Amino acid sequence: MPGRRTKWREWLTGYVDTACRGCQVFSIADFGRWFHSVVAAGLSEEQYVETVSVVAHVVAIDTMARGLGFDLLPLPEPEQGGPSQYRPARVKPGGAWVPWLEPEDLSEAESSLYPSGRPAANIMKAMSLVPEEVRGFFDLVSHQYLPPLAMRDFSREYRAISHAQIELLAARVSALNQCLY
């Protein structure tokens, strides 16, 4: 399916470029206008979440590789198939540009989406329009950072640096990147 792969790469390249341009906008108002303009141009809210997830996965993997002094991995070849097209029935406007699921609105299909024993993080809810993207991304980062319940367990240290040091580094990187999280 060479033609299909080429079209997929063109599609992905265009949307990743779109997502990266969105990351370079400096004010929330500007970002809101940008987001609404790409949705009006034909990008669905689900495609937006999927694109953000692809970018987030690549950034997490590449950042870890760079930090460990490894060469960056090439992007994998696309596989046949498509998105599930599953949209949770109870999504509603929340604190993100796209609708999200609150913990109390989870159906049986989404019951394992958020960790039990602690509040759902906004980044999890912001990706919940496409539940598999939440699961995939947090499976990755829980291995790179800390599992969800360990993040709020301040009675024990799980890594070579303390919770406080991890949060200090995260806050500094977020500030440098002008990131709300």
Image: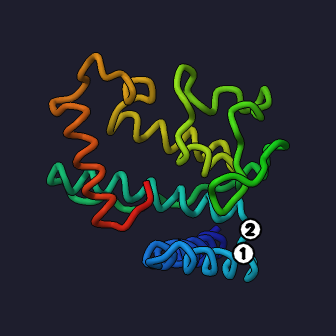
From mark 2 to mark 1, how far is it between C-alphas?
6 Å
* Mark 1 surroundings: few (<14), some (14-19) or many (≥20) residues within 10 A: few
Q: Residue at x 57, y 71 (%)?
A: 12
> Mark 2 or mark 1, which has the lower sequence index?
1
Question: In the picture shown, does residue 170 fall above or below 107?
Answer: below
Q: Quadrant of the C terminus?
A: bottom left
Q: x, y percentage for residue 88?
A: 79, 43
| Residue denoted by label 2 | 44
- What secondary structure is found at the residue carrying circle 1? helix
- Which residue is more in the foreground, 104 or 39? 104
Which of the labelled discs sits on residue 82, or is there none?
A: none
For the question of whether residue 9 can be seen, the reply is: no
Q: Are marks 2 and 1 in contact (CB under 8 Å)?
A: yes
Relative vertical location of residue 108 with respect to residue 4 in this rendering, above or below: above
Q: Which residue shows up at 72% across the image and 75% down it?
A: 39
Q: Is residue 147 above or below residue 62?
A: above
Residue 108 drawn above or below residue 128: above
Considering depth in this image, is 55 or 117 the residue closer to the camera? 117
Instruction: Give x and y (percent) for residue 76.
Output: 45, 58
Please state the horizontal and vertical placement of residue 128, each as a whole percent of the image.
Answer: 66, 46
Q: Is residue 168 left or right of residue 3?
A: left
In the visual, does 107 lie left or right of 14? right
Crowd around label 2: few <14 · some 14–19 · many ≥20 (10 Å):
few
Query: Which residue is at 27% across, 58% downward?
Result: 173
